[in-house]
Amino acid sequence: MSALDRRALVLGIESSCDETAAALVRGGREILSSSIHSQAAIHAQWGGVVPEVAGRSHLVKIMPVIDDALAQARVTLDDIDAIAVTTRPGLIGSLLIGVSAAKALAWVRGLPLVGVHHIEAHVYAATMEHDFAPYPCIALVVSGGHTALYRAESPLDLHLLATTRDDAAGEAFDKVAHVLGLGYPGGPRVSKLAESGDARTFSFPRFRAKDGSLGFSFSGVKTAVLYHVRGQDARAATPAAEDIPQRADVAASFEAAVVDALVEETLRAVRREGLSTVLVAGGVACNRRLRADMVTRAAAVGVRALFPSPAYCTDNAVMIAGLGYEVFAAGRLADLALDAASR
Ligand code: KG4
Ligand code: ZN
């Protein structure tokens, strides 16, 4: 890569789930702009993401969001050196909108095009704002769709160590939010309510595999909260939000159980792999208790834990432009046959 390439300006495009996003990042680190259109308000009425609705909204918003990112960065398409787009994993109809827009722009402008893996990009986000070489390290990805531990040798070389056996951590937050009458999206609301509760009030279960292997499971804690709120009668209706006693204590105790499991397994992975750095990313990495507990408990055993700023934990295109730069620098260019994949 030439000296000029290290200043390469990459346009990142993200449309894998319910955020339409575009961003401009120079050299994988210097963030010039980030534009995000969230569909949360659109999906809230159904209590979750409706794929067909998501695809249609991406189609309407993709070009305005790209224009906004360019305007915020005060650049034009003439200034761009490469276009990076999320190709997987995600909702296929949503991914295809971003991929089609990226291909069209790359073709019309004669620009290099690169495909980016959404999960690898979440992990990369944790490195972008720190002047610290983290590799090799452990990466914990905690989002609405994924909860997994990786051994990362470099930004583009991740090995899966463990994953969840059932729900993703964010999914558990969203489901508990529903039980507590907090609505969608649930993670930030449960976390906000938990701030006024006492996490020591209730002891919800923390999963540990019987054979000692690494892994997560959040269906147990989710069900425990459900039974706690509704009682043991499976046919009983969930009480109205205002009738749930000690709602903030339930939220805090649930949050503590999830965070405990995440920190515990991550530090076990660090020990097992003999490493000293942890990258934590994905929507749940916004969680204040997770950020505080991971940093403190990691530091106590000589391990450094790095997080992205909250704005770059949830879905965004800064992470796509960032990792896109690494893919571009590695010479892994895509052509117009670039395709999206749900997994
Ligand atoms: O990474 P992301 O934006 O989308 C996926 O790729 O899934 O993550 C969204 C998830 C949702 O489940 C949301 O409830 C959760 O992240 N989340 C949180 C917090 N903020 C977002 N969970 C717990 N505490 C938070 N503060
Ligand atoms: Zn994501």
Image (cartoon, grey):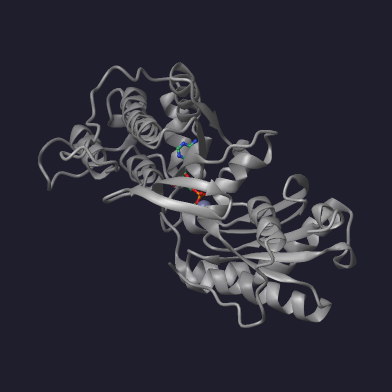
Residue 268: image quadrant is top left
Q: Position of residue 97 (x, y in %)?
A: 61, 73
Q: Is residue 41 visible?
A: no
Q: Position of residue 26 (x, y in %)?
A: 79, 51
Q: Is residue 243 above or below residue 178?
A: above
Q: Quadrant of the C terminus?
A: bottom left
Q: Is residue 170 above or below residue 317?
A: above
Q: Is residue 196 above or below residue 160?
A: above
Q: Position of residue 32 (x, y in %)?
A: 80, 48
| Residue depicted at 27% across the width and 25% down the height | 245
Q: Position of residue 21 (x, y in %)?
A: 66, 58
Which residue appears farthest toward the bottom when viewing the image?
A: 337
| Residue depicted at 89% across the width and 67% down the height | 78
Which residue appears farthest toward the left when viewing the image?
A: 233
Residue 134: image quadrant is top right
Q: What is the number of callouts on the image?
A: 0
Nearest to the observer: residue 203 or residue 251: 203
| Residue depicted at 20% across the width and 40% down the height | 209
| Residue depicted at 25% across the width and 37% down the height | 221
Left or right, residue 36 beside residue 242 = right
Left or right, residue 325 beside residue 173 = right
Q: Quadrant of the N terminus?
A: bottom right
Q: Is residue 141 visible?
A: yes
Residue 109: image quadrant is bottom right
